[in-house]
C-alpha cells in the first residue's frame, strides 16, 4: 500500500538541443527522458521519503521500460503500473524559445495512458492512503476523468486528502467538459497548488487574496501559489507567508512545479509542518531546473535540506 497515490500519463520526452529550434525545421534532439507530470510528481514524492505509487499504463516497449526502471530505482511502488501490448508509451517533443517559453507536440491521447479508466481504481488501494494527487494534464480523456472521479469518491470514504495541481494551458478551459471537470476537482480538493495564472483562470479574478479567501472558506485547507523563479505564496486559515526562490542557473524548467508538489505532499505526509514543507518544496522546485531532463533534477530530502535556509 502507498501513502501517496497519483494517476495519469507516463511518457518519454524528446528535447530540442538548441534554444530557438523550431519543429518545422530539421534539427537535433536529445532524449528520450522519463517524463509525464504525474510520474515526475510521484518520483519526487518517493525520493523524499514517502511510500508512493502511480496508477498508470505503459506500452510493452523500450520507452515504457525506461520509465518503469527509472521510477523503480527511485523508490516508487511500481505495482500500480500496468504494461499493455495494445498501445505504445506516449511521447512528448519540446522546444525552447528565446524568452524561456516552450512549445510541445504530444502523442498521448492514443497512447497506453489513454487506456486508463475507472476499472483501474480499486477501493482497497485508498484504505490506508493519506494523499491522492490529481493533475490537470491527466484529465485528457473521458476514461481518465471517470477514473479520477471514482478515486475521489474512494477518498471521501477513506478520509484520504486530495491535492490538485491544475498544471493546465489556457486553451483547455475553452472545452466546456474540461472546464467543468477541473472545477469539480477543485471543489473536492483539500490542497490546491496552482501557478499564479492558473488561479486567475479557474477563479475568474486576478485578486489573489480574494481568490484564496474564497477557497479557504469553501474548505480547502492549504493553497500554495507557485510563481516559478519568484518563489511562492502559501496560505492556510491560520497563516500566510511568502518564500523567495533559491537562486540557481536554469538549465531546463520542465517538471519544476511537479517536483515542488511531490516534495510538499511527501513532507506533509511525513508530519513535517506546513511552513517547513513549503520551504523544502520551494527549494526542490529550484533544484529541479538545474539539470536537463524532466526527472533528472529530482532530489532526496537530505539534499534539499542542505540548500534550505
Image (cartoon, rainbow, N blue to C red):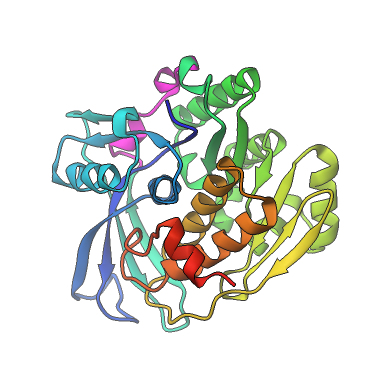
Q: Is 147 left or right of 252, judged from the image as shown?
A: right
Q: Is 194 above or below relative to 289? A: above
Task: Say if the magenta span includes residue 25.
Answer: no
Q: Quadrant of residue 164?
A: top right
Residue closest to the eye, 144 or 299:
299
Let me know if residue 61 appears in the view. Answer: yes
Q: Is 55 above or below relative to 41? A: above
Q: Quadrant of the C terminus?
A: bottom right
Q: Is 67 above or below relative to 302? A: above
The residue at 72%/68% (across/down) is 242
Let me know if residue 202 appears in the view. Answer: no
Q: Quadrant of residue 171?
A: bottom right
Q: Is 27 left or right of 155, judged from the image as shown?
A: left
Residue 275 location in percent, x, y?
Answer: 69, 57
Residue 221 location in percent, x, y?
Answer: 74, 42
What segment is highlighted magenta in the picture?
109-123
The residue at 42%/66% (across/down) is 288
The residue at 21%/63% (across/down) is 31
Give the total number of marks visible in the rendering: 0
Amino acid at each position: 500500500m502507498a501513502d501517496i497515490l497519483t494517476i495519469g500519463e507516463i511518457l518519454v520526452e524528446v528535447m530540442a538541443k538548441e534554444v530557438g529550434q523550431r519543429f518545422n525545421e530539421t534539427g537535433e534532439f536529445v532524449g528520450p527522458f522519463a517524463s509525464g507530470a504525474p510520474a515526475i510528481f510521484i518520483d519526487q514524492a518517493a525520493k523524499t521519503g514517502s511510500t508512493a505509487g502511480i496508477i498508470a499504463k505503459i506500452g510493452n516497449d523500450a520507452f515504457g521500460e525506461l520509465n518503469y526502471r527509472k521510477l523503480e530505482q527511485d523508490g516508487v511502488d511500481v505495482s500500480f503500473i500496468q504494461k499493455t501490448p495494445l498501445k505504445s508509451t506516449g511521447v512528448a517533443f519540446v522546444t525552447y524559445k528565446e524568452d524561456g517559453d516552450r512549445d510541445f507536440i504530444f502523442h498521448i491521447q492514443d497512447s497506453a495512458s489513454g487506456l486508463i479508466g475507472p476499472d483501474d481504481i480499486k477501493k482497497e488501494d485508498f484504505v490506508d492512503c493519506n494523499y491522492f494527487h490529481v493533475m490537470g494534464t491527466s484529465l485528457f480523456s473521458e476514461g481518465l476523468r471517470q477514473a479520477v472521479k471514482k478515486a475521489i469518491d474512494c477518498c471521501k470514504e477513506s478520509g484520504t486528502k486530495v491535492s490538485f495541481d491544475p498544471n493546465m494551458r489556457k486553451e483547455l478551459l475553452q472545452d466546456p467538459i474540461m472546464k467543468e471537470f477541473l472545477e469539480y476537482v477543485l471543489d473536492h480538493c483539500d490542497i490546491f497548488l496552482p501557478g499564479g495564472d492558473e488561479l486567475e483562470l479557474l477563479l475568474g479574478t486576478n485578486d489573489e487574496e480574494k481568490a484564496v479567501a474564497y477557497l479557504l472558506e469553501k474548505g480547502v485547507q492549504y493553497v500554495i501559489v507557485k510563481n516559478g523563479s519568484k518563489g511562492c505564496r502559501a496560505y492556510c486559515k491560520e497563516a500566510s507567508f511568502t518564500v523567495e526562490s533559491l537562486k540557481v542557473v536554469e538549465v531546463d524548467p520542465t517538471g519544476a512545479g511537479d517536483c515542488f508538489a511531490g516534495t510538499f505532499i511527501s513532507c506533509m505526509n511525513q508530519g513535517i509542518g506546513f511552513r517547513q514543507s513549503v520551504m523544502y518544496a520551494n527549494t526542490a522546485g529550484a533544484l529541479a531546473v538545474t539539470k536537463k531532463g524532466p526527472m533528472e533534477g529530482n532530489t532526496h530530502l537530505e539534499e534539499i535540506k542542505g540548500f534550505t535556509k
